[in-house]
Structures are given as structure tokens and as C-alpha cells.
Image (spheres, coloured by chain):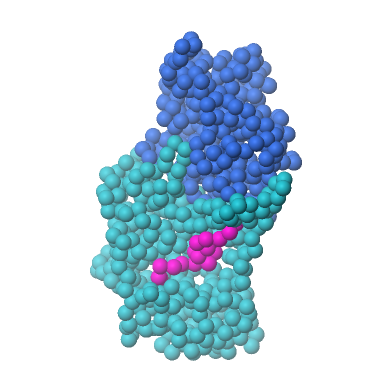
Amino acid sequence: MASPRIGSWIKIPKERLQQLIDTLASDGYRVVGPRIRDGAIILDDLTDIRQLPAGVVDEQDGGHYRLREDPTAGWFDFVVGPQSLKPFVLPPREPLLQLQRTSETWQTETPEIDDRPVAVLGLRGCDLHALSIMDRVFLEGPYVDPRYEKRRASLFLIGVHCRRAAPTCFCHSLKTGPALPAGFDLGLSELEEHFLLEVGSRRGAAVAARLQGEEPASGEITRARMATRALEQRMHDRPLHGDRRTAGRWLETDHLRDRLLGNLEHPRWSEVAERCLACANCTMVCPTCFCTTVEEVSDLSGDSVTRMRRWESCFTWEHSYTTAGPVHPTTQSRYRQWLTHKLASWHDQFGTSGCVGCGRCITWCPVGIDLTEEVAALGNEVPHA
Amino acid sequence: MPDLPTLSAAPASVDPWQPAFVEIVAIHDETPGVRTFDLAAPHGYTFEPGQFNMLYVPGYGEAAISISSHPKSPQVISHTIRRAGNVTGALFRCQPGDRIGLRGPFGSSWPVGRYRGANVVIAAGGIGLAPLRPAIYQLAAHREDYGRVAVVYGSRHPKDLLYRETFDQWRRADIEVLVTVDFADDHWTGPIGVVPTLLEQLPWMGPHTTLWTCGPEIMMRFTAQQALRQGITPDHLYLSLERNMNCAVGLCGHCQFGPSFVCKDGPVYAYRQIAPFLFVHDF
């Protein structure tokens, strides 16, 4: 079969996802996808389609996450777990530089990157948007991070158009979902017995050509799209029927930047600080929070040193440390830094919001702080500077 | 921030994490707890006044240190450092001949070239004089290009005044040097008080004057307010901010100040750019 064109669709029986996994593995990819571990769906090595959490859905709400079986659920009707693509492009810990003392000076060596290409199955619209935001941070500024660049280039992205929203989802208000944006190699839509695969790239086409797919029957592409569009409509109509359980949350984005930066002394900041534990969970699960710090790891002699980059959070004391003390000494100042950065100053820095509406920060906050609620509490007024 | 010059664009092929190892050629005692480290510059190194380097002691880490030497003496780069933490403590245990890591220069600079023909006031507090010294050297070297030039400098005690031996050189170059301290000792005959108060002794400050300030943030806030009262406009008032600069290339997120990253958009800002955030508590 000739390579399908970019933008074309093929239809495969559901079980043939196995062949997709095998094809990618034989091309040298490490294939990862959704799997259940410790009661949550994470992205982990995938060798067999029976490892997929088909028929499982996630109950999510502020500070709440549970999996349950649902006989009506398809293969991908759960939404996002605690993990995003972040650890695959920006590992939680990685060496940046190795140094060895010589008699006169220091020899440096840049550690090799494990650049075995990674194929990720089951990514949602919010996750793909988050990746493009990370690209702006690490690839499109005056400096490029070479480690991010190398990992990013070898990613093979298999997206899934969502048919179901969790109560914590608010992609619709940020226009990051529930449909996939461009940027995937293959995009999956689920029908009863089949998947439709949309070809998003040349690499995707080369893989799709080897799956012995057939052309979708008349109306099947429309039917697949309608499932996602119906969800989008439910999310859009949420203010009418107000049901978070099926239609997620809403973040009002009108004048959001100016509402936040114009309300830096609002009493709500101290109110939320009374609930916030400054535990940093929100920043760890956020698919775009990119702060890191570098630690020195040396042997006992001090002659062999590794500079180790690890994830850092603006909720820690160290994050804003200066010799005059931390710039953000209180939970109030740290929560304000996080939220104003994510939703306001991110626009100044990178020309986009730093939020994709995935809702992870709501679910994984141990006290259930909900940023959509915090933003609403700041009001709709844009103060005059 | 659209109207800020980004001076430190590097080719994408360069690993921004790779330091050059350079020799410490001399170490000078300045004031209690403060020393100046002269480093042999890497080949082809140039910088602008107000920029900083990341200095690295393997096993201890990096510290962002502004450059305090003459921009036209590129063979030696000086850093005036206060011993404050782990990294600066390790630097203070180094000897001439040791090699340390250097990445840089980074950040924005004092607008020395932009203000030819104008009056210039340098307002420094404590070790904040160090990042201004390269600008003073340049003003002195091209003194005839400028109107009136003054250095207004304050420290806590007389013994903390940096570069005292060069004040007379600056005066000979027709730079007014006004110095104040918070607490006098038995030998002090100069003014006692803070820098903003001393600015009142410069009645010629006005719309054709630019003021550049570096020091503790609270000192800069009051200096800025006083400068505005004396007729300097928000476009011609510049401050150098300190934040936790960790990577220096805008990738680590630590040094944010509202919409900007201090490492690449700063450390030198026009007052107008940061005025909405400068007076917000703990921001």
C-alpha cells in the first residue's frame, strides 16, 4: 500500500493497535502509553494492547482521583492522569555536565542523552498544546536547550480525540481541546469496533501504511468527529445545565492577563494562602511548569562532579532565594507568582497562556484548590493602572 | 518585553550550560567581606557595562556576579563579590592561579551610548556600585560627550565604601562624587543619611538627566521616587534588579519579575517597564 497522504484517514479494527505498537517497536521506538499503576493511569512502557486500561474511566475532582470500570466505556474514555509528556522531554533529574579535576584545571564532558526515540500513545489535545508551549520555552527563545531539543525531535506522537470530559477538564475555555490540534503524527478516533487514524505527518504516514487499514466507510469520519464535537458542545453549554460531571469546568479568559496583573493586592491571595500547603504538587503535574534547578553532585574527593538538573517549583523557599532572602517568602506570594505567571505573564514571555485546561493541578492538589475558582474570585473587573 | 534589547543572543548550536575555565589572576581585598576577583578573559570576550557572568566552583555551584571592570580592558574581567553563601564562600577560598568556570556575559546593560549630551547621575548603594563601575569608567573616558555627571553613593558604614581610592580619579575627570553613610565613625566628616536625600544636592537634575541606580531594592525604590520628584522622567530612569539567576539563559524560571526574566530582559530596566510591579509587596 502506498503511503497515505497527510490529512487522510484509515480504519483499523481495534485489536490492530497491537500492530501499531509492534511496528513502532520494530522501528526502534520505545512505545509508551496509558497503563494503570498504583490506582492511577500513567504513561509507561507498552508492549501489549491488553495492558491498556480499556473499559476504565477516571473520577476526578478537586483533590480526588479514582478509577472505576465502566461497561459503556471505550478504550480511551479516561482522560489525563498525573503524568504528561513533560518527563519525556524534561526528565525530573538529568545530568547536564560532568567535570573531572586535572592538575591544572577541570575537564568537562557533556553526558550523552538517551535519545532512543519514544512513541507516546494516547495523548490528548491539552497535552499536545502543552508540548507546543514547552517548545516555545526551550526551543524558540534566544537560547536553545540542546537536551530538550534532542528528545523532542525523536518523539512520535499518537493523539486521541476525547469523547468524555472529567469534572476537572476545562480545555474548551482555552481552546486546547477536546479535539486534537495539529502536531500529532497519528490521531485516533474511537468507533464501536474500529479506530480511525488520521495521518498528521510524513512519519505518521509511513507507519500507517504498514497497518493494512481500509478506507473509512461513508459517514464514519463524520461520526467520529461528532463524538468529540458533541462533547465540545456540552462543555460549551455548561453554564446552561451547569453539570461539571459531564461537561467540566470553565475558565473565563476575557481580559484574564489584566485582571490578574491588575489585582496583585487583592485579598483573595491571602485567603487562598490559608488553604494552600505550598506542597508544589500543582507544579509537578502541570504539563507546562518548566522550572528547574541545578545541583552539584560530587564524589568524596570533590574531584569528580556532576551538574544535575532537577525539577523545581515556585512554591519552594529556594526558588526565589537571593542573598537578601527569598523574594517570595510567603505562601501568598508564591501562589500569586504561580497563578499570575501561568495565566498572565506567560503571555508576555511566550505569547501564549501557560495553561492548557487539563485540570491536573485541581485533581492533584491535596486540598482541592481550583484555579478556575480562584480566578473567578478575583472578579471580572480590570482595574485601571 | 518588546522594547528591551536582548544583548546575549547566542547561536543555537552552543550549549548554554558549558562553562569556560579561566584563571584567577589576582584577588584584591576591598572592604570587610568583599573582594575583587580578576579573571583572565576567555579569547574574544567582550561585555557591556551592567552585564553579569555566572561564576562556577565545581562541587559548590554557580553564582551570578556582575562585571565591575573597564569594558575596554577585555583581557581581565573583574568581579567584586561579597561573601554571602555557599558559592561565594568557595570563591573566597580560591587563590590566584586557581581556575573557575565562567559563563557569560548575560543580560541587558546601562544605556551609556544612548545618553550622549545628557546629564548622568549614578546612584549606588553598598555593593551596588560594582555593576555601575564599568559605566563610570566609560563616562570618564568620554567625559566631553556628556553634560554634568555625578556619582551619588551610600553605604552602611565608612568601612563598607567600595573603591574609595578611585573617587579622586573620578573627581579629576570632572565627575561630582557625593558620598554618604548610614552610620558614621570617628573619622567620618561627610554626610550621614541615605542616597535619595543626597540627590537633593544636585539641583541640575531634570528632564535632560538620566539616572542609573543599583543597590538594595528598597534603596532603589526611594531613589526612583526622589528622582521623579526632581524631574527625571520614567523613560530616563534605570534600575538594576537582583533575582535568583540560576541558568542565566531564561530556561530555569527562577528570576522572573512579573512579565520578564531578569537574566535576559534585565538586570537593567527602564523604570517605565517595571513601575507597575516595583512597589508590589513580595512580588
At a point 58% along the width and 59% down the height, the residue shown is: A95
Q: Is residue A120 at least partly visible in the picture?
A: yes
Left or right: residue A62 versus residue A108 is left
At a point 52% along the width and 26% down the height, the residue shown is: B32
Question: Measured from the top left, where is residue B1 in percent x and y?
Answer: 52, 43
Q: Is residue A85 highlighted in magenta?
A: yes
Q: Quadrant of residue A193?
A: bottom left
Farthest-out residue, top: B189
* Figure chain in blue: B
At a point 26% along the width and 69% down the height, the residue shown is: A243
Q: Front-most of B165 and A174? A: B165
Q: Quadrant of residue A177?
A: bottom left
Q: Front-most of B126 and A350? A: B126
Left or right: residue A149 versus residue B23 is left
Left or right: residue A222 versus residue A137 is left
Question: Measured from the top left, where is residue B160 in percent x and y?
Answer: 51, 23
* Figure chain in cyan: A
Question: Measured from the top left, where is residue B56 in percent x and y?
Answer: 60, 44
Stretch of the chain drawn in magenta: A80-97
